[in-house]
Amino acid sequence: MTRALWKGNEALAEAAIRAGVDAFFGYPITPQTELLEYMARRMPELGRVFLQAESEIAAINMVYGAACAGARAMTSSSSPGISLIQEGLSYIACSEAPCVVVDIMRGGPGLGNIQPSQADYFQLTRSAGHGDFHPLVLAPATLQEAVDLMYASFDLAFKYRTIVIIAGDGALGQMMEPVEMPPMRPPAPDRPDWAVFGAKGRPPRAITSLYLDAEELEQVNQRLQAKLKIIAANEQRWECHLTEDAEYLVVAFGTVARIAKSAVRAARAAGVRAGLFRPISLWPYPSEALSKLIGQMRGVLVVEMNAGQMLEDVRMAVCGRTPLRFLGRMGGVIPMPDEIAAEMMHMARTHQRGNGHGAQRLLQFKE
């Protein structure tokens, strides 16, 4: 296989095609529209289903129907569109219909702008719809990783009969990088044995999220929670960068994490032993792996393109054992390496002055 230059949104679309997606339903919204446009051209060429729905709400319900029929179905959107599909995601979760969703996040709240953001963290990992459920959320930092995770997402969705969300941002969707594409998979020979597509002489099947009896719905929830525990135990993903001898740790995900790598190198050049912990799975969050690193750290800096959403997961892992700082940029502003490096060196100076003992939470925002 050879590497070629790809744009992020188009690379995600081609990876999904090579993973065997049968049906794509979506609605245009910047900064992910190129993904939909690519699918509009490529899916009919391959004899697969593409449909531009009249809204994001319609699109997710089309995904729901196709998924119940055992198809590899997906949609993509950006932050306001993801807000609209949350009711459908809840129906899909209760019905245990596997599907894949791509979220290329943009600045908010509201219509906001079309610049990169990470402010959907709560929306993807905490809410994602009403009821007690979590989708599996994966956050790539490079286009190659985005392609690899996209390719794996359908396997994960069908393995657990769950929703898998690829959490990117406007920078990831619009940037161009060399990518090595995975091979094209052959079409799936048969639909799964739980899918609904006509009885054909066998007992009929039904997929629903409606359970009017409270005890029956509780049993459904107990089954879902048992499955989530299995996912949490087996699908935590993370990367450690220069953490072996680190005393100060940056925690960041996605685009910000790749920027933080440059900051870590700059801090080390200035004499600060810095490292990076990058969660790849935002749910399940790799809390145990992060917690194991905390004992050797004199300080932890969380950096996000939001007001401090992943910060809550980090705080639970840190559990008051070391000083904790936060650097947040909002509205589509991307933090720069020098900002992150300056915060890390400030942490080191604070500790050297003897003020770094005990836990603290200092919020830092750019005005």
Image (spheres, rainbow, N blue to C red):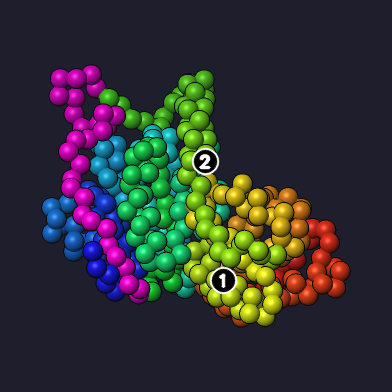
Query: N-terminal of the two: label 2 or label 1?
Result: 2
- Mark 2 falls on what kind of element? helix
Find residue 260 and name its label. Answer: 1
Pointer 2: residues within 10 angstroms few (<14), some, or many (20+)?
A: some
Which residue lies at the image location 44% right of the left edge and 26% below the top edge?
Answer: 211
Residue closest to the eye, 175 or 122: 175
Which residue lies at the image location 66% right of the left edge and 64% below the top edge?
Answer: 246
Residue 234: horizontal and vertical position, in percent? 48, 41
Residue 96 in view of the camera: yes
Is the residue 109 above or below the residue 259 in the image?
A: above
Pointer 1: residues within 10 angstroms few (<14), some, or many (20+)?
A: many
Residue 99: horizontal and vertical position, in percent? 34, 45
Query: Could you tell me how far apart the alpha carbons at marks 2 and 1 are, in whole angstroms?
Result: 26 Å
Residue 78 in view of the camera: no
326 relative to 228 in the view: left or right: right
Q: Main secondary structure of the magenta part?
A: loop
Q: Quadrant of the N terminus?
A: bottom left
Residue 46 figure quarter: bottom left
Residue closest to the eye, 62 or 312: 312
Give, as a single range, the part of the protein colored magenta: 176-204
